[in-house]
Image: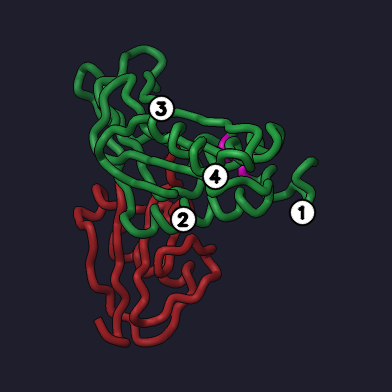
Chain colours: A green, B red
Amino acid sequence: MVIVQQADFDAAELTRQLRERAAGKSGAMVTFTGYVRDYAPDQPTQTLFLEHYPGMCEREIQAICDTAQTRWETHEPVVVHRHGELHSAEQIVFVAVASAHRGNAFKACEYIIDALKTRAPFWKRETLADGKQFWVQQYDADAQKTNLWNSAIPGNPSS
Amino acid sequence: MSGTAIKVLYFAQVAELTGLRQETWPIDTPLSGSEWLAQLAARYPQLEPVQRLKLAVNQYHVGLDAAIQPGDEVAVFEPVTGG
């Protein structure tokens, strides 16, 4: 289930719903929630604006979820990603993965959030307390992590 | 838009630098991503160096060797910062 929306989400309710859908088949669920934090080292973040590419966003996130579901044999993953203007400490993104065993659930959840960083077409613009604005740059570390996932042996989820 | 142009979408920093969100761009023959980026740089020198920019064709990420055909939707942007 992939949702891209401006409105906030209820992580507890999304978790409850996945638990209900996966009941009996999944022995483990891993969830991740991302929040707006201070990006600049010396000044608090006033707002974070997320621009997105409607249509491609949903399709790309669905493709990421499909890969995770197949590779780690999970229940259909849940991703909710917000766009628009967000304030400090607000929720940005939610990922939930249920699987028979915890190892696959942890790996699939981490794969999804790593892939969102480098593939989901969002761009973050930060506004500092003094009104200064800048676009957040993609971290080299995120790109490297995505490459690591791609180079891991496919079909060997326990690797 | 028929077979004589592409629809170009600009996002984030690229939209700020071009002053546009989208435009129709005439092309009469297929181009590679890098050939089209060279055209883009000629029209908007403020986007240089364009090699850092990423492309999506019909809403799929593509490399600079990808073919761009008349009728395509081509998006150009800085590396994404989702999640």
Which of the two discs, 2 and 1, labels the residue nearer the N terminus? Answer: 2
Which of the two discs, 1 and 4, labels the residue nearer the N terminus? Answer: 4
| Residue that mark 2 sits on | A60
Q: Real-space Cα distance between discs 3 and 1? A: 32 Å
| Residue that mark 3 sits on | A12
Q: Name which residue type carries label 2.
A: Glu
| Residue that mark 4 sits on | A115
Residue A17 is one of the magenta-drawn residues = no
Q: Relative to residue A73, is residue B29 drawn left or right?
A: left
Q: Residues within 10 Å of mark 1 (few under 14, many from 20)?
A: few
Q: Name which residue type carries label 1.
A: Gly
Residue at 28% from the left image edge and 33% from the top image edge: A8
Which of the two discs, 3 and 4, labels the residue nearer the N terminus? Answer: 3
Which of the two discs, 3 and 1, labels the residue nearer the N terminus? Answer: 3
Q: Which mark is residue B31?
A: none
Residue at 29% from the left image edge and 44% from the top image edge: A5
For mark 3, give the secondary structure. helix
